Image (cartoon, helix red, strand yellow):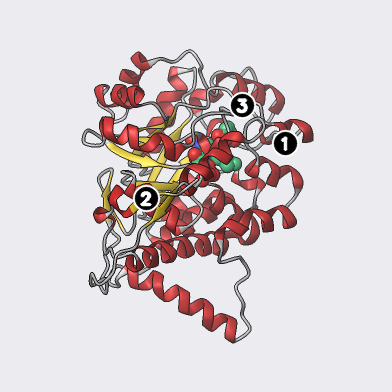
Amino acid sequence: MSGSTDPAREWAAFQYEIYLNGMTGAVPRLPTDLTRLEEVAEQRLGPGPVGYVAGSAGSGRTAEANRKALDRWQIVPRMLRDVQRRDLSVELLGARLPAPLALAPVGVLSIMHPDAEPAAARAAAAQGVPFVLSSASSTPMEEVAEAMGEAERWFQLYWPKDREVTKSLLGRAKAAGYTALFVTLDTWLLAWRPRDLDQAYLPFLHGVGTANYFTDPAFQAGLAKPVHEDRDAAVLHFVRMFADPAKTWDDLAFLREHWDGPIVLKGILHPDDARRAADAGMDGIVVSNHGGRQVNGSIGAADALPGVVRAVGDRLTVLFDSGIRTGDDIFKALALGARGVLLGRPYAYGLGLDGQPGVEHVIRSVLAEFDLTLALSGHTAPGQLTPDALTRANA
Ligand SMILES: Cc1cc2nc3c(=O)[nH]c(=O)nc-3n(C[C@H](O)[C@H](O)[C@H](O)COP(=O)(O)O)c2cc1C
Ligand SMILES: O=C(O)C(=O)c1ccccc1
């Protein structure tokens, strides 16, 4: 998107582009109701990969709770408020963004499409939306950065056991132009995930998700033989050092020491943990339950949001993910106090179904829908949204 146009107008114009394409026979290849992406992905993509992405922890209660928590709220539109000109832009983590949206860190994207992270990152860059690169990406972080040009990029860390590897990953991320660091706190261990267990499908065992490590000098230093000479040993080493369940709040000082940009803790659900993040001098948090992929039976992320915002909303940047599927979901998360949202599975499906254009379709659709929801309910900017815009749905 060129910087000179009004982003909100451009997203609304996408609606007409879709009509026109439809009229000339160039029908959109992906659903415009983004809640249908999963069903289409299930039909068209391989059972292992789509099971990995769509799957969640245990019996799926948390993924379900995420949807219920958002559906419990309903928007109460207001009339006659001059919504002709809208400005969706926000300032987040030191960056001016065209909209309160970023693509969530999703590892192992090559299981969805051979173009993987660089394609998703290019799609994000084309829309001015930040891309959060997973440390478990299937492409080295430098290559993804290269694909993005000057566009805003953030790096997500799975915090390794080994300090040298941690320092090395942070140094590389900084050098490659990633500005903010997202540290994921809810995935020191992979949860009990029946779809993957039943299909015996784990991407690492297919050698996916190790790119940042296998290219890392500090990681390589811990191997008896080079990666290409003993790949199995390298994978085993990766699995052992990839995350560290022994970490505590005291360890955050180490990250502060080795990262001079904004640090965001991802996976906060309890107000006391949010306070601890603020006390530790963190710049932001993501209220998230990892899309329901970690603790089955846990609180729906949107149910956790108001309490966290009450506790720390004025002390650090509160972001939100888990369950966002549509533009009205973004509206609700912002009205409940989030300053921005991350989108997870929907863009992974877009990538799987149509590569970079598929991700662009998802971003443009969700933002067009958000812009229209904002306007049609009487608002012209994300900063105007408060809980007053919502009501609890009758059970
Ligand atoms: C296939 C898949 C891989 C993921 N990989 C990561 C990851 O590498 N790092 C991370 O912090 N979160 C990861 N997540 C969690 C997302 O960042 C995000 O929290 C979650 O997808 C949000 O929920 P949603 O999918 O309902 O939008 C992953 C999620 C999925 C579906
Ligand atoms: O699958 C996930 O949810 C996830 O976070 C992950 C963890 C390690 C590697 C790739 C993805």
Dividing the image into four equal quarters, which quarter contains ligand 2? top right
Alpha carbon distance from label 3 to label 2: 34 Å
Give the image quarter of residue 356.
Answer: bottom right
In front: label 1 or label 2: 2
Which residue is most to the bottom? Answer: 24
Which residue is most to the front? Answer: 394
Report the amino acid beneath label 3. Answer: Ala
Q: Which residue is mark 2?
A: 391
In percent of width and height, residue 297 lies at: 57, 28
Report the amino acid beneath label 2. Answer: Thr
For ligand 2, tell me if the residue under mark 3 lies within 8 Å: no
Give the image quarter of residue 184.
Answer: top left
Question: Is residue 6 depicted above or below 142 in this figure?
Answer: below
* Residue in the picture at 64% in, 25% down: 234
Q: Which residue is mark 3?
A: 191
* Residue in the picture at 46% in, 25% down: 159
Q: Which residue is mark 1?
A: 195
Nearest to the observer: residue 371 or residue 144: 371
Q: Residues within 10 Å of mark 1 (few under 14, many from 20)?
A: many
Q: Secondary structure at mark 3?
A: loop
In front: label 3 or label 2: 2
